[in-house]
Amino acid sequence: MSDATDPNPKSTSPPWARLVFLQIPMAISAASLIAAIAVTLGRPLEPAWYLAAFLGTWCVYLRDSAASCDAEDRISQPGRAALFRSSAFLRTTLPGFTAVAGLATLAWIRPTTPTTILLVGVGLLGLLHAFSVGGRTTPASGGPSPLQSRLAIAKSPMVSIAWAAAAVSLPVLEGRGPGISTATWIEAAMLGLPLIAILLGDSLLLDLRDRDADAQFHLRTLAVRLRPRTVHVVVGGLLLLAAAGFALGSVVGEPVISELALGIPAVLGLATAWTAWPILRNREASLAMAVMSWRFLAAISCLILA
């Protein structure tokens, strides 16, 4: 760990922010999104799958936090960085424990071979950002390799695709219901495409938060390559695409419940965070919760209407 003084997160963060910095809501939001899609497709999953989703997501995001806490997070997310810098347990032991617990849960569930391949691919994509940081602890530690530069610009699209692929495919492959047919996959794809759009908008807002820090560490993400106003325009366009996609799916497709039960709260939830950006941009924990809130809203809506 670097010897430089860390910002004090307690001076600027509310008491509940520690849970956000520990990535617990992020992990819960992953399970919530899968639940919303499983209900929409009428293919409910066993409870153990939601535990596995929670543990797997938590492991990946703990690893990301540990890898970034002595690098760009010290600038863009000082509260989270200070928390992880202060505890070797959070940087090493807890990610390892969650990985073992997640693998044990999967061993108990015994996923099919296609699901195993899907989960391995999603896990690797999720870890790419942590690997892209490398071993740099200051902006002067050296520029990124060409591979790291490519990973930086592709980070948001790849993470969005990984989230959507896991959230849509898991209920299809492992959910209870009639046999998997071409129509099942078409229905899943019609739900997954607008989901990618809204997930990419979600990721771009977080990249915009990290823009200055990523630029200092030579991580040329999409938000670094574009102007902030352009990023906001892109996010607005993605919200419109997502809304149109969910609306089309509700008319053309035949889900168990209308895709609008998922789409309306998802789009409105992220749109609220987008429009509240000027207020939230300097509130580390509040911004993170606002950006992920659409996943909880979608799950609540789908469960109520199921």
Image (cartoon, rainbow, N blue to C red):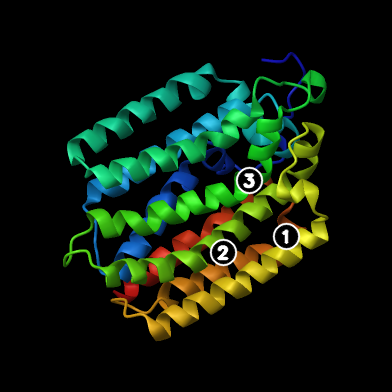
Q: Is residue 166 left or right of residue 90?
A: left
Give the residue type that dot 1 points to: Trp
Q: State whether residue 290 appears in this view.
A: no
Image-quadrant location for residue 181: bottom left
Q: Position of residue 70 (x, y in %)?
A: 68, 24
Q: Position of residue 43 (x, y in %)?
A: 24, 64
When the figure is inspected, residue 256 is found, relative to residue 166, above or below; the finding is: below
Element type where label 1 sits in the image: helix
Image-quadrant location for residue 188: bottom left
| Quadrant including the N terminus | top right
Instruction: Identify the residue at horizontal 50%, vertical 24% (top origin).
Output: 90
Give the residue type that dot 2 points to: Ala
Which residue is the site of mark 1? 277
Q: Kindly identify which numbered label has been placed on residue 197.
A: 2
In the rendered structure, which disc, 2 or 1, sits on the residue that comes first in sequence?
A: 2
Distance from Cα at disc 2 to Cα at disc 1: 19 Å
Which residue is the site of mark 3? 154
Instruction: Identify the residue at horizontal 72%, vertical 21% (top origin).
Output: 137
Give the residue type that dot 3 points to: Ala
- Observer-side mark, 2 or 3, equals 3
Q: Position of residue 179 (x, y in %)?
A: 17, 65
